[in-house]
Amino acid sequence: MSARWSELFALIIVLLSFVAGIYSYFWMPEKIAVHWNIRGEADVYMPKSLGLFTPPLIFAGVTLILIAIPRIDPLKENIEAFRKYYDWLLIIFPAFLFITYIHLILWNIGFKINLLLTIPIGIGLIIIYLGFLLENSKRNWFIGMRTPWTLSSDKVWEKTHKLGGKLFKIAGIITFLSIFLQEYMLILTLTPIITITIITTIYSYFEYQKEIKHKH
């Protein structure tokens, strides 16, 4: 399988991250901020060589995993059925990582942009897009809500992911609200995701039991 335009884009983003790190290295203080608390205050600092080049290495690892998944999944033909949605994930997610990395660089050279205003928007958009991806996904081993029951039935997979997709879109909108309720940002982001996981797991179980009863 040859490289796709989305994969090339993602790899270019990774390369640009390394270039940005190298270019900005000499502008950085010896220790740079790499983590911010819930109030938007920098609370973890690292030597600039480690702080600047660890994120691009992580981006590279994540990108290579995303590129590998459609090639190694035993049900790769199912991924190909919704590949156009997966391709856009390969665009959106690396782009988000790159933007957060540029944010880190700018903050450390003096442009103190409030992370609590920009990060929720990016995370919210990704969660909403995951809703579209899930709604259109087909049964596979890597992408989606992989419970024993969704993996055992195409019909249960489809019903569960239609529900999960709608809930993810709502969760993304809730994440946006954390811009106005910054002290609750973590709660407003994680609680909907955990709740969706519980709901879809239970839903897939009961849908599978209904399917078994109909077969008998």
Image (tube, rainbow, N blue to C red):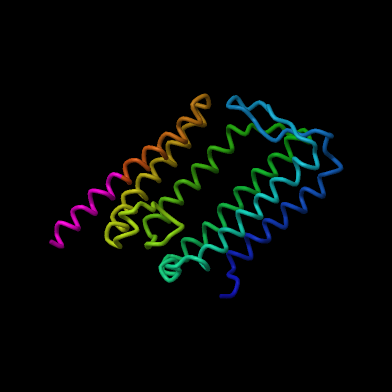
Rendered position, 186 above or below 81: above
Quarter of the figure with the N terminus:
bottom right
Quarter of the figure with the C terminus:
bottom left
User: x and y percent of residue 209 in the render?
Assistant: 20, 52
Q: Is residue 102 left or right of residue 29?
A: left
Rendered position, 151 above or below 25: below
Find out whether residue 66 is within the magenta segment: no
Please name the residue shown 64% across and 30% down the image: 36
Find out whether residue 203 is within the magenta segment: yes
Q: Is residue 22 left or right of residue 152?
A: right
206 or 188, which lies in front? 206
35 or 124, which lies in front? 35
| Extreme residue in the bottom direction | 1
Residues shaded magenta: 202-216
Please name the residue shown 59% across and 38% down the image: 118
Rendered position, 179 above or below 172: above
Q: Is residue 37 left or right of residue 208?
A: right
User: x and y percent of residue 191 in the render?
Assistant: 42, 34
Marker count (numbered): 0
User: x and y percent of residue 24 in the render?
Assistant: 81, 45
| Extreme residue in the right direction | 26
Please name the residue shown 60% across and 48% down the image: 96
Rendered position, 156 above or below 123: below
Magenta stretch, main secondary structure, is: helix
Q: Is residue 158 left or right of residue 13?
A: left
User: x and y percent of residue 13 in the render?
Assistant: 67, 56
